[in-house]
Image (spheres, rainbow, N blue to C red):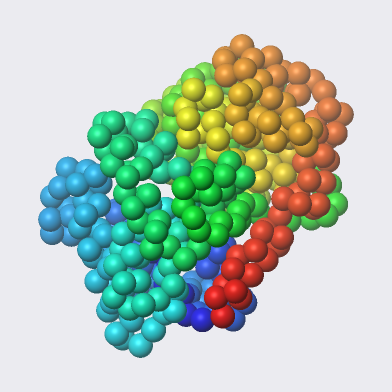
Amino acid sequence: MKVLMILSKEILTDDRVYREAKALVEAGHEVAIIAWDRCGEYERESEIDGIKIFRIHNEGLMKILPNNLFRNPLWWKMAYRKGLDIYKSGFRFNVVHCHDLDTLLSGVWLKRKLKVRLIYDAHEIFGYMISRDKPSVVVKSAFWMEKSLVKYVDYIITVSEILENYFKSFAGKPVTVVMNCKNLVSKKYIPPNNDVFTVCYIGVLHKNRMFPELVDIIGNIEGVKLVIAGKKENLYDEVKKRSERYENIEFLGAIPFSDVIPKTLESDVVINMINPNDLNDRISLPNKQFEAMVCGRPIITTEGTYSGDLTKKLNCGVVIDYNEKAVERTIKNLRDNPKLCEHLGRNALRAAIEKYNWKMEKRKLIEIYQGFI
């Protein structure tokens, strides 16, 4: 089959989309992706691992408009037109695979015009995510838009059981969970080899991940090093500036997703503090969870979250309250108890080997497409 994916950001910054596209190529399908390169950092057309990439840049009116809320309607039209151009040029795709709600309208237009299949790959509940910083009228519109567009969808893919239940409650469409699991590094436990106990965080630098406070907390703990990496958005500049105050903080800046697992493997523990008062974060399973598992590293996460519940269930980390004292106390305890770290890390790796790995998850993706054939 020929598959057109639509993504509202750069594919080289989205590990899930890249892994799904690569899995389909390896299964014998042809894949092209329309991506929104908002900063114009990449060439308009390229190819990676057999995946054809067509990028839309912010130009003309797109560049003038004040923010992405106003740019979205133009993005939907441009993605639709680019999809038609790709189809007319000879890549006659059978399936449009839309990643998140901010691509789905373009997919619906393409389905109605070209009579192709439509997959909605919901990485999160979009209305919950934008409720952090968008007016209630925009949030309500997002929920209304999703429920209106889902009726055109042939299949829904999502990331967790919670989201599966959410979509089943109203969509009336088949739903499959494809988690953000990672490829196994090794089936044998690889112990860390650090002179200084190393805490790792690679991800969103947002206030709901306890940034920038986390820099100060760990920066003042003796015998501990913190390694940070994240995209150039949200609190990036503030975290970078604050990291420079401490000798035991290493700020890597933005790194390619190919470096995430190696850097995680170099750590002793992964930290992923999630604000339980944020509805979207509370029900999510962040990439950090699965990165820690395949590396055999314990994770520190938050009480009252889905991530915390899974960590307890698998006994693969430490679940704590969302406050500074709990972070400091837990890091010191793990620093001083290498046997505990190893025990939790081995549990994490065992969970990855038995269930939480990409090899198992990508089978589900391939089976969906096999069903279409």
At 19% from the left edge and 47% from the top edge, which residue is drawn?
Answer: 70
> Residue 220: horizontal and vertical position, in percent?
58, 16
Q: Residue 314 location, x and y as percent? A: 78, 37
| Residue at left offset 31%, top offset 49% | 145
Above or below 287: residue 73: below
Residue at horizontal 76%, vertical 18%?
A: 333
Q: Is residue 71 left or right of residue 250?
A: left
Query: Residue visible at 70% across and 62% down?
Result: 359
> Compared to 20, does 61 lie above or below?
above
Position of the C terminus by quadrant: bottom right
Q: Is residue 13 above or below residue 198?
A: below
> Would you identify the image quadrant in which residue 322 lies?
top right
- Give the residue at the far top of this rendering: 325
Q: Is residue 88 above or below residue 368?
A: below
Q: Is residue 260 visible?
A: no
Q: Is residue 13 left or right of residue 303?
A: left
* Closer-to-camera residue (10/159): 159
In this rendering, would 23 be left or right of 344?
Answer: left
Give the image location of residue 283, x and y in percent: 55, 35
Q: Of residues 129 and 226, which is closer to you in this image?
A: 129
Q: How many numbered marks appear?
A: 0
Left or right, 26 with respect to 31, comes to right
Residue 214 drawn at (x, y percent): 53, 23
Quadrant position of residue 10: bottom left
